[in-house]
Amino acid sequence: MTDLSHARPTAERSAFDGESSTFRRHAPLRKFWFDEVPPREGVAEERRYRQERLAVAFRLFARYGFDQGLAGHITARDPEWPDHFWVNPFGRHFGRIRVSDLLLVNSQGEIVVGEGPVNQAAFAIHAAIHEARPEVVAAAHTHSLYGKAWSTLGRKLDPLTQDSCAFYQDHALFDDFCGVVLDTEEGARIAAALGGNKAVILKNHGILTAGPSVEAAAWWYIALDNACHAQLLAEAAGAPQAIPHEMAALTHEQVGRANGALFAFQSLFEGLVEAEPDVLT
C-alpha cells in the first residue's frame, strides 16, 4: 500500500513546487497608487454615498474615543441643495448612528429631513464653513482628548514627523475662545480663521478639519488628533527636532493630498461596515 502521509495536495504543492504550478503570471506592471474612484452617476447616488461615509465616520470616531458627552459633529454638504448639509442628531451616540438617523439642515438651521434635534453649535460652525468654502463637502469637529490638550497651548503644530507634515502650512489657529459657539457670527470668525486650510486649532476648545469629501475631512481629523498626541509626547520627553522647512513643504505635497486621505479612510470604512452592517440602514 502506498504511503501518502507525506504527499501534499495539488494546490498546496503548486504553491511550493515549480514542476506542477497552476499559477500564471501576468505581464509585469508598475502600480504604486490606487485607481481613481469613479464619479457617481446622479444626485441620488452621490447623496447616498456621502450619507454612508458620514454615518461610518461617526462610528469610527466612537472607536477612536472622539465621542465624549454631547459634543461633536461632522457635516456633509448635500449634492442637490448646496446650502443644506447632513449632520448627526444631537444626543445620539456616535457609535449608534445609522444612515437613517442623519438630519438634513438648511441654511437657516431648520431641519428639513429627520426629526432632530440639531446641535446649535454644529449649525453655527458648519453653516459658516460651508458658506465660506464652496469646495468643502465635509467638516468635522469633536472634543478629542489630544486635540483639546494641544489647543490649550495656543499655537500651531510643528512639522515633527512625516505624518504631521500633512498639516504643514495647512492649518490655522483660532485664538479667541468665547465659550460654546451658539451664533453664526462666531461661526463666521472660525471660518475666517480656517481660511483655505484643511484644519484649524480652536484655542482652549479642540480641533476642526474640512475637506473636499467626507473621507478627507474625517481622516484628517483622525490624523490631526494623532499629530497633536505625537507632539505632546515628544515635548514631554525632551526637545523635539523639527523637519526643515523645504523638506516639510515637500512632504506636505506627498502626504497631505485629499486622495490619500480618501483611501486611508476607505480602508477603515470597509472594516467598519463588515463588523457593523447596520450602520448603512
Image (cartoon, rainbow, N blue to C red):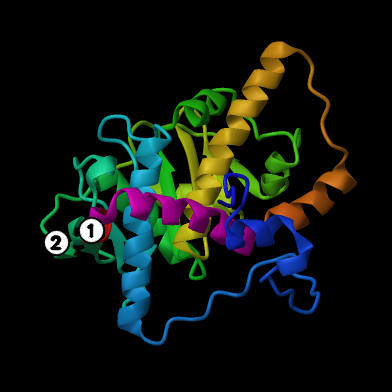
- Most common secondary structure along the magenta stretch: helix
Describe residue 183's horizontal placement relative to residue 150 as left or right: left
Q: Is residue 254 magenta?
A: no
**Looking at the image, is 14 positioned above or below residue 202?**
below
**Looking at the image, is 241 positioned above or below residue 252?**
above
Q: Position of residue 237 (x, y in %)?
A: 71, 12
* Picture residue at 76% right of the left edge, 13% below the top: 238
Query: What kind of element bears circle 1?
Result: loop
Q: How many marks?
A: 2
Quarter of the picture containing the C terminus is bottom left
Residue 158 numbered tag: none
Amino acid at dot 1: Leu
Residue 102 numbered tag: 1
**Looking at the image, is 49 positioned above or below residue 254?**
below
Q: Is residue 279 visible?
A: yes
Residue 198 versus residue 192: which sits nearer the camera? 198
Query: What kind of element bears circle 2?
Result: loop
Residue 248 versus residue 81: which sits nearer the camera? 248
Residue topped by disc 2: 114
Q: Dots 2 and 1: beta carbons under 8 Å? A: yes
Q: Position of residue 67 (x, y in %)?
A: 33, 34
Q: What is the crowding at mark 2: few (fewer than 14 residues within 10 Å), some, or many (at least 20)?
A: some
Amino acid at dot 2: Gly
Describe residue 45's horizontal placement relative to residue 265 as left or right: left
Q: What is the crowding at mark 1: few (fewer than 14 residues within 10 Å), some, or many (at least 20)?
A: many
Q: Earlier in the sequence, mark 2 or mark 1?
A: 1
* Picture residue at 57% right of the left edge, 57% below the top: 9
Residue 10 versus residue 254: which sits nearer the camera? 10
Which residues lie in the magenta part?
257-278
Q: Is residue 270 magenta?
A: yes
Q: Is residue 184 visible?
A: no
